Amino acid sequence: MSQLSEVTDPSFLDGLQGWTLEELRARRADATATETGLSYMRRIVQGRLDIVLAEQEHRRTGDRADVSRLVEELPSILSGNVHAPGLGRLTTVLAPGELDPDLEERLEGILPAAKLGGLTGITDGELAEAAGGLAELERSVSATRRAVLDVLDRLQEEIVRRYRTGEATVDSLIP
């Protein structure tokens, strides 16, 4: 079972109130690593989608770009969706560990990284199909990430509850 499927399995939180503080923290670390990987994957998907949408816009306006122009425009294309809706979370882990192989496979099936440099040479239909697939994958990854964030919230709430009730103390953190 992959870390993603484990963390998103409803049984991941079974027995939560009976776990030791160390078990809670270990599960929180697993969920955090999973969320970081999902966040990174979402940004990769969104970046590819932004590039595809920029190429579609060039075609719509009749201003077809060549690959070198598309590369020159990458900074502005990729900075267009920097702020996602909702309340952001300050990530504690900046680099993901291993990305979920199923999500990577889905992404490569929609629009392989190797094809990004050749977008100007694919048909409008292929471009539209890639845009639709990437948008759907982004929604799916975002929904899964939201589910993992909910798991993280439950774990954090349990840790906080223990400190508030005195079941756990700050003194236990000092070796």
Image (cartoon, rainbow, N blue to C red):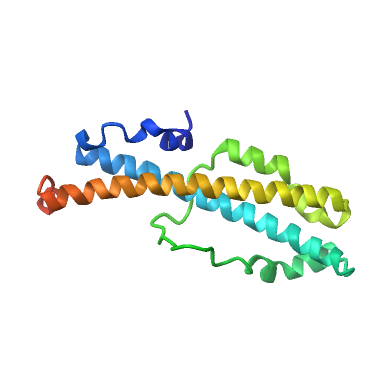
Residue 112's quadrant in the figure? Answer: top right
In the image, 117: left or right of 166?
A: right
Q: Is residue 159 visible?
A: yes
The x, y position of residue 22, in whole percent, is: 23, 40
Give whichever of 124, 41 is nearer the camera.
124
The x, y position of residue 11, in whole percent, is: 36, 30
Instruction: Please determine whether, in this image, residue 103 is positioned above or below residue 134.
Output: above
In the image, 109: left or right of 81?
A: right
Instruction: Please determine whether, in this image, residue 171 is positioned above or below residue 78.
Output: above
The x, y position of residue 168, in whole percent, is: 13, 47
Query: Residue pushed farthest top?
Result: 1
What residue do we see at 26% from left, 49% from top? 157
Q: Is residue 174 visible?
A: no
The x, y position of residue 38, in whole percent, is: 51, 48
Q: Count every numbered label the image shows and give the total.
A: 0
What residue do we see at 69% from left, 56% from top? 49
What residue do we see at 61% from left, 53% from top? 44
Give whichever of 77, 147 is nearer the camera.
147
Give whichever of 26, 52 is nearer the camera.
52
In the image, 48: left or right of 126?
A: left
